Structures are given as C-alpha cells and as structure tokens.
C-alpha cells in the first residue's frame, strides 16, 4: 500500500480508513457532494441555496406546474450537460479498474460517474439523460428533446450565469408562452427519468444497490449527508453484515455515529488518496 501525504487536519482519519479498507472489495454510495467540484451545488452543504423542489404530485396535477418545470429544467440542462467529471469521479473509476471498488451506487442524476469511466453504476434516483412518456412508455434522449424545446420555443435563451441546482434545474424568470414538449408517438405527458420528491426509488433499482453492498466487503459513503432514507437503508444493510463503513463528507451525516471511520473533508481529495494508496485487487 502506497503511503500517502496525510499532512491535513483529517490525516489521521484518512490513515485509519486506509487501514480499514485495505485488502477489501468496496461498494461506494455517492451523493451531491461528489459533484460540487464539477460546479453542481449540493442540496444541503454550507451555503446551499434554499430550494423548494417540485413534487411528483404537483408535476402530474398542474399544467402550469409542468410548464414552469420544463422551462427551468431546460435552462438548467444546458449548464448541467456542460459539467465535467472531477478527480473524485476519476478516482472511483480508477478504483474500479484496479478491482478495489465493486461498483458505485449514486443518488446523483448527473451521469458524471459513467462519463468518468465507472462501468458498474446504480443510479438510484434516475438520470437526466432520458425522458419517457407516462402514457405509452416511449423513451427519448434528453439531447434530442432539448433540440425540440428550442425549436418550439425560439425565444428561450440560456443566461450566462444560470443558478444551477443539484438536479439540473433553475428557477425561471417566466414560463409564459412556453410550449411544453409532448410524446411524438402518442402526444402523452413526458417526464424526466428521475425520482421526484414524493416518489419512491424503484424497487428493482434498490434491489440492485442492495446486491452490490451484499457482495462487497466494505462500504464508502462519499458526499452524502444521508438525509434520504434509501442511503440510510444501505448503510444499515452494510452494518447488519458487519462491514466497515467509511463516511467522507463535509459536515455531519445521519449515520456518523454508526460509521467505522468518519472523514470530514472534501471527497475529491480523499477519494484520490484512496485510489493512489489502496492496493490493487487485480
């Protein structure tokens, strides 16, 4: 195991984590904090904007709500799609290639783990890459839909300083006159392939995440405050199997008292230390 430079306030905790994780095959659960270094803000970190995200019930019940959502979602998509994987994403891809990480379970919808080179990624809350029809089930690529939105609404422009949210949404100044995209097959209602507030993680998706934890020998939680119950449940699954749990997050999480090691530091730096220091399992 390569000895890393640990001359930082969290150096002792990082060293403890390396000792705990060495020689183990590791599942990783990531949250919004992993993507902050890519310019996508956290929901709950220090300085996070106050947000009132649209619920699934509001989206389904109100044509005006859907219009507001699609304007904001389209504006945010432009900036969201321009984000690039950071060194934390790259470190996890390196750890998977070395046989240390068995896969990544992410609460993020940004697709940055896949773009960084991770191959086994369980997207618990869906992805902004796809849109589907609630009536006939037809699936559309978000890039194609974005072209259609701009063709139908030529007035829409992307401000230079879009205030981007963790789900790729922004608060539009107005939605007046916006033509909401509909299914080109049946003219049905379209919805991004993401889990809205007020919705549950699909059962089969959570089962896939559970299986990843079940077949691993340790769990790293990176960049999540574990406020969402699905994340807490996965930590509990690991604890029941007596797996070591290492949490890397700036600020407190709901599962800190249950962690084997808690590292209060940035995820990009710590994950890169792990990638450089943990011995290959290949």
Image (cartoon, rainbow, N blue to C red):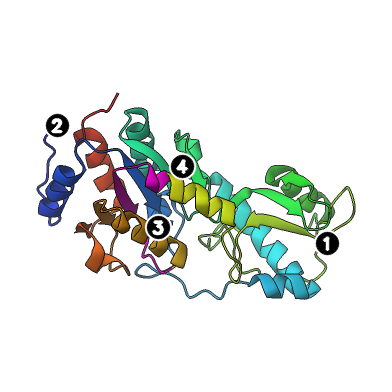
Q: Identify the element where label 1 is drawn.
A: loop
Q: Which residue is mark 1?
A: 179
Q: Are marks 1 and 4 in contact (CB under 8 Å)?
A: no
3D distance between C-alphas at marks 2 and 4: 25 Å
Residue under label 3: 234
On the image, numbered disc 2 is attached to which residue?
Answer: 2
Q: CA distance from mark 4 to mark 3?
A: 19 Å
Q: Are marks 1 and 3 in contact (CB under 8 Å)?
A: no
Q: Nearer the viewer, mark 1 or mark 4?
A: 4
User: Which label's residue is closer to the chain start, 3 or 2?
Assistant: 2
> Regarding mark 4 in the picture, which secondary structure is present there?
helix
Residue drawn at x 50%, y 60% is 166
Mark 4 nearby-residue class (10 Å; few <14, some 14–19, many ≥20): many
Residue at coordinates 71% horizontally, 70% vertically from top-left? 59
Which label sits on residue 113?
4
Instruction: Give the residues in magenta.
Output: 212-227
Image location (x, y in percent) of residue 235? 35, 59
Q: In terms of depth relative to the viewer, which is nearer, 248 or 200?
A: 200
Image point (59%, 50%), residue name = 127
The N terminus lies in quadrant:
top left
Foreground: disc 1 or disc 3: 3
- Evaluate whether residue 109 shows in this view: no
- Mark 1 vs mark 2: in front: 2
The label on residue 214 is none
Residue furthest out toward the front: 241
Give the mark count. 4
Label 2: how many residues lie within 10 Å, few (<14), some (14-19) or many (20+)?
A: few
Left or right of residue 191, residue 20 in this image? left
Q: Earlier in the sequence, mark 1 or mark 4?
A: 4
């Amino acid at each position: 195991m390569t000895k890393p430079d640990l001359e930082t306030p969290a150096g002792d905790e990082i060293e403890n984590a390396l000792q705990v994780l060495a020689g183990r095959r590791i599942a990783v659960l990531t949250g919004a904090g992993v993507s902050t270094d890519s310019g996508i803000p956290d929901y709950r970190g220090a300085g996070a904007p106050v947000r009132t995200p649209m619920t699934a019930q509001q989206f389904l019940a109100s044509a005006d709500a859907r219009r507001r959502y699609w304007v904001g979602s389209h504006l945010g998509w432009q900036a969201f799609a321009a984000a690039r994987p950071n060194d934390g994403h790259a470190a996890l891809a390196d750890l998977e290639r070395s046989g240390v990480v068995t896969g990544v379970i992410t609460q993020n919808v940004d697709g940055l783990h896949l773009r960084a080179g991770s191959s086994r990624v369980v997207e618990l809350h869906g992805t902004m890459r796809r849109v589907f029809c609630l009536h006939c089930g037809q699936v559309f690529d978000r890039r194609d839909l974005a072209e259609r939105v701009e063709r139908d609404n030529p007035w829409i422009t992307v401000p230079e300083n879009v205030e981007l949210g963790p789900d790729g949404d922004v608060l539009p100044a107005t939605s007046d006159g916006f033509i909401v995209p509909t299914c080109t097959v049946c003219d049905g209602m379209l919805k991004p392939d993401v889990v809205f507030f007020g919705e549950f993680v699909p059962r089969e998706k959570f089962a896939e995440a559970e299986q990843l934890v079940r077949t691993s020998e340790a769990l790293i939680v990176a960049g999540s405050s574990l406020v969402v119950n699905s994340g807490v449940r996965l930590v509990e699954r690991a604890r029941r199997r007596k797996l070591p749990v290492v949490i890397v997050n700036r600020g407190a999480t709901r599962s800190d008292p249950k962690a084997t090691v808690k590292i209060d530091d940035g995820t990009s730096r710590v994950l890169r230390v792990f990638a450089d220091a943990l011995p290959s399992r290949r």
